[in-house]
């Protein structure tokens, strides 16, 4: 008489199903990374805008916290330091803090699917995503920098999204001593990763 281990068969079927399906909704890991980034997309420009606001209002090395809200819910806070002195070259070392941040449901292009994700960063500021900006020959000069760090997701995609982005662009005189980004001049390139998935970021702000 042949004995059959049902638990082994069940486990094998589960593993094969996971390998073929790529997740509960059938998306692969790279698509998951793309969706994770799309939920953060508009926050990138917000982070840059708040960074410049902190730079323009700074009266000491530590900038005052600069805050905005998600379109749907939550908050985005930029904190950190800026170089002092009279030089027209300055560096900003900033942190990106998020609490229950969401810009609402996004429609995934080509899939006609709405994805809703909220984001949080570590409550320890030292462990929050690092936004580094270098302003050279301002006000009418150049901008470069990076945004590197982890965002914890909850919603249609769960887990951690890790951004590794680089910026390059131009700055301009905003009047009254303000330095602003030139609209449409800032390129953003790099990657967003979740687990084994990677999404290549390439856009202009």
Image (cartoon, rainbow, N blue to C red):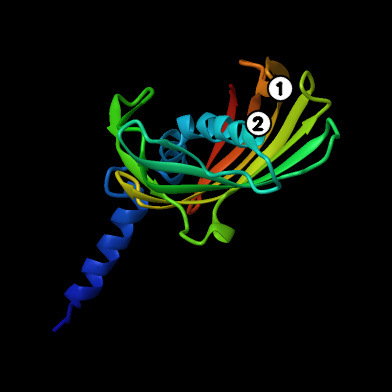
Q: Is residue 195 left or right of residue 93?
A: left
Residue that sits furthest to the left in the current view: 1
Question: Within the image, what quadrant is residue 112 found in?
Answer: top left
Question: Within the image, what quadrant is residue 159 found in?
Answer: bottom left
Is residue 13 positioned above or below 55 on the image? below
Q: Nearer the viewer, residue 148 or 193?
A: 148
Q: Position of residue 1 (x, y in %)?
A: 13, 84
| SS at badge 1 | loop
Q: Position of residue 160 (x, y in %)?
A: 45, 53
Marks 2 and 1, how far apart in space?
8 Å
What residue is shown at x 38% (from left), y 23% (from top)? 109
* Residue at image mark 1: 177
* Residue at image mark 2: 56
* Contact between labelled residues 1 and 2, with CB atoms less than 8 Å apart: yes
| SS at badge 2 | helix
What residue is shown at x 37% (from left), y 54% (from top)? 19
Is residue 68 positioned above or below 175 on the image? below
Q: Nearer the viewer, residue 195 or 42?
A: 42
Q: Is residue 1 left or right of residue 129?
A: left
What residue is shown at x 32% (from left), y 55% (from top)? 18
Q: Is residue 81 left or right of residue 25?
A: right
How many C-alpha atoms fall within 10 Å of the one at disc 1: few (<14), some, or many (≥20)?
A: few
How many C-alpha atoms fall within 10 Å of the one at disc 2: few (<14), some, or many (≥20)?
A: some
Of the numbered discs 2 and 1, the one sitting upstream in the chain is 2
Q: Position of residue 189 (x, y in %)?
A: 64, 32
């Amino acid at each position: 008489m042949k004995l059959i281990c049902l638990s082994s068969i069940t486990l094998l079927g589960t593993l094969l199903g996971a390998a073929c399906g790529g997740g509960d909704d059938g998306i692969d890991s790279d698509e998951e990374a793309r969706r994770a980034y799309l939920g953060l997309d508009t926050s990138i420009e917000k982070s840059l805008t708040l960074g410049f606001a902190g730079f323009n209002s700074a009266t000491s090395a530590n900038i005052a916290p600069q805050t905005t809200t998600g379109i749907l819910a939550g908050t985005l806070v930029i904190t950190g330091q800026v170089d002092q002195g009279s030089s027209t070259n300055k560096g900003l070392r900033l942190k990106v803090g998020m609490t229950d941040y969401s810009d609402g449901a996004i429609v995934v292009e080509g899939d006609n699917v709405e994805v809703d994700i909220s984001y949080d960063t570590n409550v320890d500021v030292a462990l929050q995503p690092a936004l580094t900006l270098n302003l050279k020959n301002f006000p009418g000069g150049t901008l470069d920098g990076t945004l590197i760090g982890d965002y914890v997701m909850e919603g249609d995609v769960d887990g951690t999204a890790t951004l590794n982005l680089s910026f390059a662009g131009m700055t301009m005189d905003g009047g009254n001593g303000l330095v602003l980004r030139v609209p449409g001049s800032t390129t953003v390139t790099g990657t967003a990763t979740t687990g084994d998935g990677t999404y290549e970021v390439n856009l202009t702000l």
